Amino acid sequence: MLTRHHHPIAAIATAPGRGAVGIVRVSGKNIAPVIAAVCGRALLPRHATYLPFRDALGQVIDQGLAIYFPAPHSYTGEDVLELQAHGGPVVLQLLLARCLEAGAAINPATGLAWLPGLRPAQPGEFTERAFLNDKIDLAQAEATADLIEASTETAARSAARSMSGEFSLAINTLLEQLIHLRMLVEATLDFPEEDIDFLQKADAQGQLQRLQITLDSVLQRATQGAILREGIKVVIAGQPNAGKSSLLNALAGAELAIVTPVAGTTRDKVSQLIQIEGVPLHVVDTAGLREALDEVEKIGVQRAWAEIESADAVLFLHDLTRQDVTDEAQDALNYLAADARIADVLAKKLPENTAIIEVWNKSDRASADVLRAVSGGVLISAKTGAGLPALRQQLLRVVGWQAAPEGVFMARERHLRALHKVADQLSTAAAQLHAAHPALDLLAEDLRQAQLHLSEITGAFSSDDLLGEIFSRFCIGK
């Protein structure tokens, strides 16, 4: 631990703003002086006590509940004091200041401060201490933040599952199997003179194959969890008056964007968070893609392309009412030519893994001949809602959502990177094991590297820089 981890810490643990209840939390060794100064009496462990909280002059700051959790039976694994007061910002700030003041008070018997540097907590420091004191592992700590930030019920349940240790259990099961396989390989290296072929007798190839199958299952569930955590950025693109704003409103179930018959009504992006089967989607309506008629629209088109380039999926919207070349042929031909130019630019600008869904809008107004001519994509009517269920399902498919929600682990990009590295190392190990004359030292190294990558997920092996990056993203007080 760093020196700062030995200092007691205090912070407001509830969100900024006014509320019925607010909490001030203190954690560290021997916080009895703070309890005595603020509460005026000793507290029974794990009992809520209603009493006045007093300042240095004995005046009442507020009345509320005080709860004392002695180590190691607390969230952080240290002595913890929670003061539950009325949730006004001024009250909570006065209460926090009083705790810090009491922690710095001088002991007349020694002339020293009662506590070794009680100080305000840094972001995520309470959860960081829970990790450092082995109350939770790193994956559980991250899931705590993910639960707070969850934007859908499915995401919240997935985060709660990871926070309770299901993801960590799956990783630890993989580690146990991997360590057992490493033991067999190391034994073969240590006793080359033995007649028994340790690897063949112990079915090392079968063990490795089963390990890879289990890893694939964990990776698939974690990948779905990453989709739940990050959400999907979906950008609606197309020419003016194709119905982009109407589609956003239809998907969101609210009138968010202005809809008029005038081309170029949308000048800037309009964003909305929606969900499909619990998967969060950040849907962005953009300005119509065309040669801008004025400076303001030009800026809107530029911003539209910037949003498109950062999308996970693009809904390329077509207007079916302008596809009939037998009616006002020149206008229809111009429209089709513009659509083709946009499609060409999309193909060149977007990364290969960005999904483009062709969406044919205004099916309620299109002729039968035009509808029959449509090939591929999704037919919809943003006005009537026809085809929207199929569009929602297509969106989930193209971004890779396929798991049952109850089996998903909340996961982060770093977890996926680590799991993919493990998969690569196991593939190399399998190739080595299937060779006519395996290089056992290389095989052992592949398995060792795989174990290190797995250990990074739960924090059994991690750098201080990684920990600092993770916990700095938490809120203060957590």
Image (tube, rainbow, N blue to C red):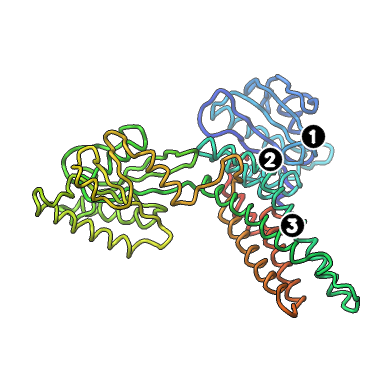
Residue shown at the point (19%, 55%) measured from the top left = 336
Mark 2 or mark 1: whose residue is earlier in sequence:
1
Distance of label 3 from label 1 (alpha carbons) = 33 Å
Q: Nearer the viewer, mark 2 or mark 1?
A: 2
Amino acid type at image mark 3: Leu
Q: Which residue is mark 1?
A: 70
Please state which amino acid type lies under the numbered disc 1. Answer: Pro
Residue drawn at the location 66% of the way across and 39% of the way down: 10
The residue to which callout 2 is attached is 164
Neighbour class for label 2 at 10 Å: few (<14), some, many (≥20)? some
> Mark 3 packing: few (<14 Cα in 10 Å), some, or many (20+)?
some
Q: Earlier in the sequence, mark 3 or mark 1?
A: 1
Dividing the picture into quadrants, the one containing residue 11 is top right
In primary-sequence order, the first of circles 3 and 2 is: 2
Is 85 left or right of 278, judged from the image as shown? right
Q: Which residue is mark 3?
A: 175
- 172 relative to 28, above or below: below
Q: Secondary structure at mark 1?
A: loop
Q: Position of residue 209 (x, y in %)?
A: 70, 62
Tell me the amino acid under the disc marked 2.
Ser
